[in-house]
Structures are given as C-alpha cells and as structure tokens.
Image: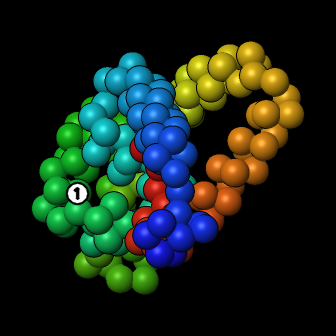
Amino acid sequence: MTPDGPNTPSRSELAAFETATRDLVGLALRSVDESGLSIPQFRLLLALSESGPMSSTACAQTLGVAGSSVTRLATRLQAAGLLVRGDDPANRSVVTLSPSDAGRQLIEQVIARRRAELSGVLERMDPAVRDRCAAGLEALHQLLGEHSPSRLPV
C-alpha cells in the first residue's frame, strides 16, 4: 500500500474503524469489569480455557508478558479459587496452570454477557448491513492475524 494510492483508506474509513475499535473494546471491557477480574487475570484464564493446561512459560509467551507476571496472576487467581496448579505428566518439574471449574464458569459468564450486549445491538441493525459488516470484520480478522503473535481476545 502506498500513501495516497488506490488502496489507501480514506480518513473517514480510518475514523470508522477507529470508532468501531473503541466501541468493541469498550464492550469487552464492560463484560470483564462485571466479573471482578482485572483484564490480565481474565486474559490468563481465557488463554487457559481455550488451550488447556499450560506452563507459566507457555502462558507468558501466549499473552506476550513476562513469566513473573503470569506467576503473580496465577497466585491471585488460585487464591480466589479460579485457577488450579498441576503437574505435567511428561515433566514433573513443570507446573501447569488451568482454570478451576469456578474459573471456567466465570469465563462463560463474561462471554455470555458480552454476547448478550452485542446481540442486542446487532438485532437493531439491518440484516443486510449486518451481513456485510460481519464479512468485513472476518476479512479484517484474517489480515490482523497475519501480523499478530497472539490472537487472544480480551
């Protein structure tokens, strides 16, 4: 893409995507706020929920944070009964992390709140416009995924 080339997005297109980003991030943050978790805590539980038990090192790589951050988050989540530490059968010196049943339930509640709010908004949108938006967002997701080390949502 060249500046001012035929594929260069217009200012109004960029503004629309920036606004949509803020709106969607706001929706995601609201759904997590009600859980009582911090965003980093939620992201760790979500990563473990989606990928299964992982070591702290693997979690840190997935989340793009330092290993010590994962250890602190895991300690807080374990104290809250939302995370379980276990053993790796292939290497007993490795401690694995996984969400507890309560942690999984909390993740499901956050996602359900998010879907309910989003669904309520989308129901008010013209179905043809909604379909075009969904197709455009899927294309954007694919392109962003090419450049993102982690596709883990908030």
Q: How is the image coloured?
A: rainbow
Of residue 119 and residue 129, the one placed in the foreground of this image is 129
> Which quarter shows the C terminus?
top left
In the displayed structure image, the side of residue 117 where residue 63 appears, left or right: left
Image quadrant where residue 115 sits: top right
Residue at the bottom extreme, as displayed: 90
**Kind of residue indicated by mark 1:** Val
In the displayed structure image, the side of residue 92 where residue 47 appears, left or right: right
Q: Is residue 123 above or below residue 92?
A: above
Q: Is residue 19 above or below residue 143?
A: above
> Can you give x and y, in whole percent of width and height, for residue 65 in the image?
23, 62
The residue tagged 1 is: 70
Residue 117 in view of the camera:
yes
Q: Residue at x 62, y 26 (%)?
A: 118
**Count of labels in the image:** 1
Residue 28 in view of the camera:
no
Image quadrant where residue 61 sits: bottom left
How many neighbours does mark 1 have within 10 angstroms: few (below 14), some (14-19), or many (20 or more)? many
> Can you give x and y, in whole percent of width and height, for residue 49 in the image?
51, 51
Residue at the right extreme, as displayed: 128
Q: Is residue 45 above or below residue 123?
A: below
Q: Residue at x 46, y 56 (%)?
A: 152
Q: Residue at x 74, y 16 (%)?
A: 124
Q: Residue at x 41, y 29 (%)?
A: 26
Q: Secondary structure at mark 1?
A: helix
> Can you give x and y, in whole percent of width and height, for residue 75 in the image?
20, 47
